[in-house]
Amino acid sequence: MEKQGNIKISSENMMPIIKKWLYSEKDIFLREIVANASDAITKFKKLAELGETTGDAAYKITVTTDEKAKTLTVEDNGIGMTEEEVETYITQIAFSGAADFVSKYEKAGGDGIIGHFGLGFYSAYMVSENIEIFTKSYRDGAQGVHWTSDGNSTYTIADCDKQSRGTKIVMHISDEEKEFLKESEIRRLLNKYCAFMPYEIYLNPKDGKEDKPVNDTAPLYLKQPKDCTEEEYKDFYRNTFSDYNEPLFWIHLNMEYPFNLKGILYFPKVKKQVELERGQVKLYCNQVFIADNIKEVIPEFLMLLNGVIDCPEIPLNVSRSFLQNDRQVQKIAKHITKKVADKLIELYKKDKSKYESCWNDIATFVKFGCIKDDDFYQKIKDVVIFRNLKGEYLPIESCYGEEVTEEDAKAGKEPQSVYYVSDEKKQSQYVKMFLSAGLDALVCDTYIDPHFISYLEYKNPKRVRFLRIDADVAGALKEESGADQKIEEIFKTALEGKNITVKTEKLKDTSVPAVVNVSEFMRRMSEMNSFYQMGDSPADMTIIVNTANPAVQALKSAVAEARNVAVMQIYFLALMNYRRLDSEETTSFTAGAVELLEKYLQK
């Protein structure tokens, strides 16, 4: 016998409010409906294990699209419901907290509301103009029940002739949402939200044919690490992230105390060295997808990795404000960070050659992690390495000097100077000078290095200061004395009006007529202003004229006209080894070169 009733809500505008707040993430309705089906099977399975009922163990969820009928159906063979339970769980409990919902979430902007107050089922009304429920309880002699509502405040409920236990949800998709009738779109959503659900999910199964489930009910991360092969790890990576580049290595998380946490984090091979590449860390709760890259659970720097983390301790439906303030969640984040640090340290100690071979790919991740998370830096600092000019890898800690005490500072002692190269090709002249003098420098050529070396100076202010290789002519590159007043005056006269300071030094490398130096502090300030688009503030430059160079010495006896042209050429050559010439400088340099050639050939 059919009867009608009113959905018990405490606000007449309840449904419009639900639709409003859930609209931005409406495709999540499929996760909610399928997750409910999975829960229903779990409940029946538990009863069967306890001996309170019997039934087949072929548990499954079937999803069916019908574009002609404009329906999307999700059916399970779980515990089912009686008429009384339908009344309770669908028409009462679903809205028992309606008043609280309105007062809390209408003001808060609907942050993570799906699942609160039983709204999971009603999320389907975001895409449906009418929903039918066909259900039958597992209990002996239970009668099938048919419930239907158009999502307003009324519903009808009646008996039906459903033969098997379980629940079938038939969503009559509205014309505006017909994309959810397409098999391809539903398959995409099932892959997104339900890829690892614990029961097989079939999409549009064909009668008499052996169909494959769309999900993996036993994903690799649930297995014990000792039971997983290298090929299985690689296959899982390819299938989960559609990345056919092999991962460098991975970390299998498997913890049951003090909280339950399983997952696999992969270190991918980077595609570009110059910028930070965002990875994808998928967060699950009992094999049900929650979201990608939840920074409250997964530290921001770990989002450069690819991975899957499943933590039943985190509710499926929860607000971010809850995650930010939950101590258990904070412990989980710290544990994940510790496991990543432990893996890197283990690899460095056990297989240093592999660690070094992977460094170009993981360096950005490690450096970013140090900057963002001091705990990570403290754990990992001994295995942070840099390549030197000879191609060897050095732990950065080995490059630091002893800590400069107050007494040392008063005596004029400064922290250890560590020279570095940001572009080996552009700074090749400086590299050549360093190598020929038996000096060394570190290669810091990634996007994050300017920030990272500043961070290292901040963490070790009394032990190290970093200087780019063109910031100063190191003492070992100079002879004891080399100042030449006459040459200095020649250059100052020719370069009058140029924004550059002139100094003379006798360098050990006699082949170099001059080099440009820019103080490390001024250059960093200039680069920072440029990075933050705070206007052009060119750094102050100094040209170091090499009095040991024959061409420089020849200037003393050259006629004034030729001398001035030669000085400008030496200036431009030094400038070219520091930066790219602008159009005006290039024109002047070319004209000077032609003039010198003509004078040389006419002799």
Image: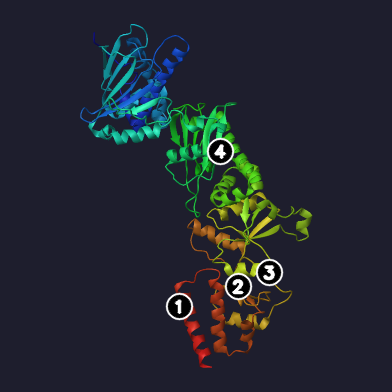
Tell me the mark number nearer the camera, choosing from 1 and 4: 4
Instruction: Kindly identify the residue that appears in the image at 50 percent across and 86 percent down.
Output: 597
Provide the residue designation for mark 2. 515
Q: CA distance from mark 3 to mark 2?
A: 15 Å
Asked whether residue 114 is in view, the answer is yes
Residue 45 figure quarter: top left
Q: Earlier in the sequence, mark 4 or mark 2?
A: 4
Label 3 Cα crowd, 10 Å radius (few <14 / some 14-19 / many 20+): some
**Secondary element type, mark 3:** loop
Q: CA distance from mark 4 to mark 3?
A: 44 Å
Q: Earlier in the sequence, mark 3 or mark 1?
A: 3
User: Where residue 251 sits: x, y (%)?
Assistant: 56, 38
**Secondary element type, mark 4:** strand
Q: CA distance from mark 2 to mark 1?
A: 21 Å
In front of the other: 326 or 171: 171
Left or right: 17, with 499 as reference point: left
Left or right: 293, with 94 as reference point: right
In front of the other: 549 or 566: 549
Label 2 Cα crowd, 10 Å radius (few <14 / some 14-19 / many 20+): many
**Secondary element type, mark 2:** strand
Q: Earlier in the sequence, mark 4 or mark 3?
A: 4
Provide the residue designation for mark 4. 251
Q: Amino acid at mark 4?
A: Ile
Instruction: Kindly identify the residue that appears in the image at 50 percent across and 54 percent down.
Output: 273
Q: Amino acid at mark 3?
A: Ala
Q: Earlier in the sequence, mark 3 or mark 2?
A: 3
Q: Earlier in the sequence, mark 2 or mark 1?
A: 2
